Amino acid sequence: MKDIDYGKIGQRIRDIRMSKEYTQEYLSFHAGIDPSHISNIEHNKTKVSLTALVKICNALDVTVDYLLTDVYSSPDTALENQLLVEFRKCSPDMKERILKIIQTLQ
C-alpha cells in the first residue's frame, strides 16, 4: 500500500472549497476548525486528522472517498458518490430525465 499523499488531500480540499466559493473562514466556521489549521492542511504544512477530515467533508458537503479520489485506489466509488451528491440536488423531474439519458447511453 502506498503512503497517503497529504499534499494531494489538502489541494483537493482547497479545490473543492474554492469551487463552492467558500473562504477558509467560512469552511473553518462550519467545520469547527481554526482557520489557520485549514490553511495549514491546504498548504501541506500539517497532516489532516481523520476527525478534521470528516468535519471538513461535512462542511463541504462531500464524502470522504470523493475527497480522497486519486489518493487511494477506488476512484469508481468516489465518482459514484460524486454523482450521488450532484443527483440529490436535482428536482424529481430532472432526476427522471437523467435516468432516461443514462438508460439511453447504455
Image: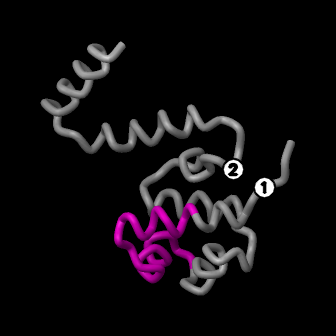
Are the two marked residues, 1 and 2, in contact with CB atoms closer than 8 angstroms?
A: yes
Where residue 72 sits in the image (x, y, percent)? 71, 44
Please tell me whether the stretch drawn in magenta is mainly helix, strand or loop.
helix
Residue type (three-letter) at the residue carrying disc 1: Ile
| Above-or-below relation of 97 to 51 | above
Please give left or right for residue 32 compared with residue 89 in the image: right
Spatial CA span between label 1 and label 2? 7 Å
Secondary structure beneath label 1: loop
Where residue 16 sits in the image (x, y, percent)? 46, 62
The N terminus, quarter of image? top right
Q: Which residue is mark 2?
A: 71
State the image quarter where residue 97 is shown. top left
| Above-or-below relation of 70 to 87 | below
Is 101 in front, or is 13?
A: 101
- Mark 1: few/some/many CA within 10 Å (<14, 14-19, 20+): few
Q: Residue at x 52, y 74 (%)?
A: 32
Magenta run includes residue 30: yes
Please give left or right for residue 82 compared with residue 11 in the image: left
Q: Which mark is residue 18?
A: none
Magenta residues span: 12-33
State the image quarter where residue 11 is shown. bottom right
Is 57 in front, or is 98?
A: 98
Residue type (three-letter) at the residue carrying disc 2: Val
Where residue 67 sits in the image (x, y, percent)? 56, 53
Q: Which mark is residue 4?
A: 1
